[in-house]
Image (tube, rainbow, N blue to C red):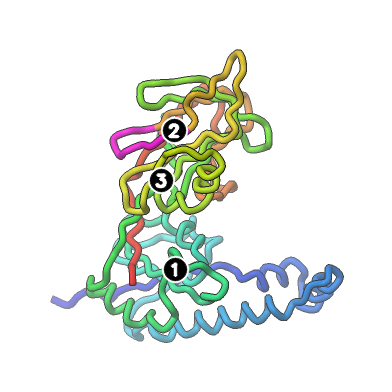
Amino acid sequence: MALPIPRVVVVTRSTPYEALVAKRSTRGQAEFFLRTRKQRIEPIESAHQRFRDALARVLRVIPAKWRRANVARSDLDRFLFEPEDIIVVVGQDGLVANVAKYLDGQLVIGINPLPDLYDGVLVPHPVAAAGDLLIGAAQSKVPVEHRTMVQAQLEDGQRILALNEVFIGHRSHQSARYRLIVHESSESHSSSGVIVATGTGSTGWARSIHLALGGPLELPTPTARTLTFFVREAFPSIATQVSITRGLLDERQSLDLISEMDEGGVIFGDGIEDDHLDFARGQRVKIQTARESLSLVRA
């Protein structure tokens, strides 16, 4: 029985050059705008061309008989992924986080087109490796790292899924008011919001908070079925407490918050504020390890 023909979905985002020209209408206008600010367009344009060249090289090594699709980051929420898709992310690490929440076990190959500019934590592979990785993925002969994800779910079933972290707080610089419940303890808070991070996210925003707070808490690894939470700038008062400001959650545990905000309460994941859930007074959200995980092809 013949195996199904694989479909490769190549995920990209606009380059800084493309975004700049789109905003200023023409290259000339973009160049003039930068020049008035003592900046040059040539380095941005060069990086753009290098990215386009790298992308073209990746597209050329996709076997001719395979199906293929290209999707931009801005269209991810409207794209229908198939269960057997092989996802090729060409870009920076954050693009992997952007696509992860739309997947359910599909293999993801992260290609770093500009290794001098991008760290390559989630896009660890050079362009030259794309062809072999595609063949290996189609034959299930590549090493795969299953990175833990986090979910935040309201009582009505609405859910946010994230690879790095979820944020619960106020949409502006106002204090967030809520009741926090964890490990059979609870208290009322006024703070700058709560971060619940995975091991992947523990190298970013959560790590910065952890370093600022200090203390013995050990951050989880990317594949550990463990989350860490931090309360940002908790404020003590007659009505609010600050004894529960950080901790770990294993996959059997959750962090629950009940909103005490009349307006402006939000929940979003991986820094994507436009894709959020409203968190109004009386609503309860449960944050815990997600069933889904990111299946990232490793070197």
| Residue 280 shown in magenta | no
Name the amino acid type tagged 2.
Leu
Q: What residue is disc 1 on?
A: 123
Q: Residue at x 35, y 86 (%)?
A: 64
Instruction: Count neighbours of disc 2 (C-alpha within 10 A) and say few if under 14, some if 14 to 19, many if 20 or more.
Output: many
Left or right placement of residue 246 versus residue 238 in this view: left
Is tag 1's residue or tag 2's residue first in the polypeptide sequence?
A: 1
| x, y percent for residue 96 | 45, 61
Left or right placement of residue 209 versus residue 26 in this view: left
| x, y percent for residue 82 | 34, 62
Q: Of helix, strand and loop, which one carries label 3? A: loop
Instruction: Count neighbours of disc 3 (C-alpha within 10 A) and say few if under 14, some if 14 to 19, many if 20 or more.
Output: many
Which image quarter: residue 48?
bottom right
Could you give the CA–CA distance between mark 3 and mark 2, rounded to whole angstroms? 26 Å
Name the amino acid type tagged 3.
Leu
Instruction: Count neighbours of disc 1 (C-alpha within 10 A) and say few if under 14, some if 14 to 19, many if 20 or more.
Output: many
Residue lying furthest top: 238
Q: What residue is disc 3 on?
A: 219
Q: Of helix, strand and loop, which one carries label 1? A: loop
**Which is more toward the observer, 270 or 246?**
246
Q: Residue at x 82, y 70 (%)?
A: 33
The stretch in magenta equals 246-254
261 lies above or below 86 = above
Could you give the CA–CA distance between mark 1 and mark 3, rounded to whole angstroms? 22 Å
Q: What residue is disc 2 on?
A: 154
**Which is more toward the observer, 55 or 92?**
92
Name the amino acid type tagged 1.
Val
Q: Residue at x 63, y 32 (%)?
A: 264
Is tag 1's residue or tag 3's residue first in the polypeptide sequence?
A: 1
Q: Of helix, strand and loop, which one carries label 2? A: strand
Q: How many marks?
A: 3
| x, y percent for residue 262 | 62, 24
